[in-house]
Amino acid sequence: MVLNRKDAAASLFFIGVGLLYGSIILSKLPIGQVTEMGPGFFPIVLSSALILLGGIGLLKSFSSGPGTLFGKFAWRPVITITAGIVFFGAVLSGLGMLLTVFGTAVISSAASPALKARSAVLIGLAISVFCVLIFILALRLPIPVIGAWIGN
């Protein structure tokens, strides 16, 4: 029996995250029952699902062959997507939904070196219009379309 180290490591990570968050939920939030769910019910279900999927992946890693060694870590996607999330949180109230989602999409699209600037702008426009339609017009969230920094 040969262990696929990459699959086993990913599976153990899932199990670890599921156990960590599950233990936090169990110590802080009431779970309730299926008929009367508490605030911790859905998070504990998600944690359990993560542990289950990690366990399945760990069992599968024993039969999937040796696999390949860990390669070079892709820092570019991690940095650009994290920068997009930070940008969104930092400027949403000031720029408003339209420009913030556009900026977030453009920043995050830099994660792929194959994506051209024109495509990133078009994707940003489409996502920002979609978010305004869904979150502001349909769901009526109290977020300005154009923020105070621009003139609202």
Image: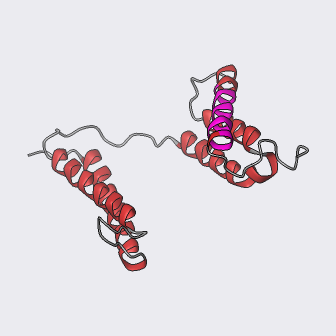
| Residue 121 falls within the magenta-colored stretch | no
Asked whether 130 falls inside the magenta stretch, the response is: yes
* Residue 47 position in % (x across, y down): 34, 61
Query: Can residue 110 be spotted in the picture?
Result: no
Camera-nearest residue between 2 and 127: 127
Rendered location of residue 28, percent (x, y): 43, 78
Q: Residue furthest right?
A: 151
- Segment tinted magenta in the rendering: 123-137
Question: 124 or 129: nearer the eye?
Answer: 129
Q: Residue at x 17, y 45 (%)?
A: 60
Residue 145's quadrant in the figure?
top right
Task: Name above or below for residue 124 compared with residue 20.
Answer: above
The residue sitting at 68% across, 54% down in the picture is 89
In percent of the image, x 56 and y 30: which residue is there?
A: 112
Q: Is residue 133 above or below residue 55?
A: above
Asked if one can make out residue 122 in the rendered structure from this viewpoint, the answer is yes
Q: Is residue 13 left or right of residue 142?
A: left
